[in-house]
Image (cartoon, rainbow, N blue to C red):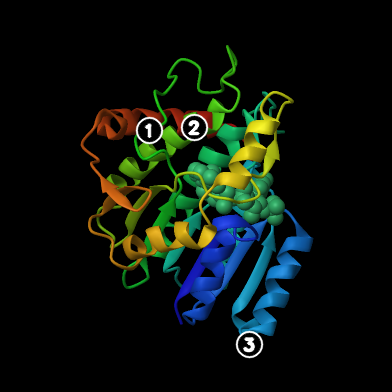
Amino acid sequence: MPTTVITGGTDGIGRALAATYLERGHDVLVVGTSAEKGGAFLAAAERGGAGGRARFLQADLSLVPENRRVVGWITRTYPSVDVLVLGARFHRSTRVETADGFESNFALYYLSRYLLSHGLAETLGRAEQAVVLNFGGSGLTGPVRWDDLQLRRNHPGTGALGHSAALCDLLGVHFTRTHADTSVHYVLNHPGVVATSFAGEYDTATAPHVDGLRMSGKPVSQAVEQILPFLDAPPARLTAVLEGRRISTSTTAFDPEDAARLHDLTGKLLTGLPQ
Ligand SMILES: NC(=O)c1ccc[n+]([C@@H]2O[C@H](COP(=O)([O-])OP(=O)(O)OC[C@H]3O[C@@H](n4cnc5c(N)ncnc54)[C@H](OP(=O)(O)O)[C@@H]3O)[C@@H](O)[C@H]2O)c1
């Protein structure tokens, strides 16, 4: 039976994708922090007759050890993973550091996705044709602040999430090069503005703007429709999608040398943290 793993699968686009893959007969694991939302997902699956194929794993993916625990759990539980959706986000408009000492958006939006992508590469590689969906910037959200990846100087407020999304674009580039010997395809997706919970903590200046986005965004169902064709038949090993339209990955946002540089820097940042 195919297996789908979705971080941020308890809400928004991730939750809708989880329902879609359950309907298609997949085993579906959603990962999130909220036991209440996880329980709601399991109850809905049960009502739909898919209870036996739905699982929820509670984890705070902004923490490095939690990502390692999740990778271990998935590796022990599933022989292979066919679809990995990296959708967890908690958008903070002011600078906060995690217990590991990373800027919080960097930790959840980029570092978690780095750890899960590479940590699950072997398990993904065992599927006939696996696909990873990472909600990156699709070339729109750079430039990368190479001298200040932790955004210590002039924190960009809501732009912190976009900065991490640009790092995700480079993660996709390096992942497909590093794991070129597998059949794993990688899709980077910027869905545009979608009416979801916009999970996060926003300062008083930003909060009304985010409320507006929650109201004016496209329906989640439309965001799912726009990305599913690329997950079902990825047109290349690395594909970038912007609101349902494939965009070039030959621009500077997807520079392979930058991608290798980021990969090395990330490895150094992780050195010394508990395994
Ligand atoms: N909505 C938009 O307009 C938009 C625009 C561009 C890009 N995107 C991207 O699309 C993806 C999905 O966004 P969305 O708007 O559908 O999501 P959302 O409604 O904001 O939900 C966020 C999800 O992340 C999970 N999450 C938050 N903190 C977590 C943590 N520390 N550890 C693990 N999980 C955590 C939440 O689950 P719990 O509550 O259970 O923790 C929830 O399932 C995200 O990557 C987002 O940045 C969205």
Q: Is any atom of residue 199 visible in this view?
A: yes
Name the residue nearer the viewer: 274 or 246: 246
Q: Amino acid at mark 3?
A: Gly
- Spatial CA distance of label 1 from label 2 is 8 Å
Q: Secondary structure at mark 2?
A: helix
Give how far across and how far down residue 181 sits, in percent: 25, 57
Q: Is residue 133 left or right of residue 108?
A: left
Please tell me whether residue 230 is drawn above or below residue 52 in the rendered image.
above
Q: Amino acid at mark 2?
A: Gly
Residue 140 is labelled as 1
Q: Secondary structure at mark 1?
A: loop
Quadrant of the rendered structure where residue 213 is?
top right
Q: Which residue position is annotated with label 3?
A: 49
Quadrant of the rendered structure where residue 252 is?
top left
Q: Amino acid at mark 1?
A: Leu
Q: Which residue position is annotated with label 2?
A: 162
Q: Is residue 213 left or right of residue 240?
A: right
- Residue farthest along the top direction in this orientation: 153
Q: Earlier in the sequence, mark 1 or mark 3?
A: 3
Give how far across and how far down residue 4 sits, in percent: 49, 68
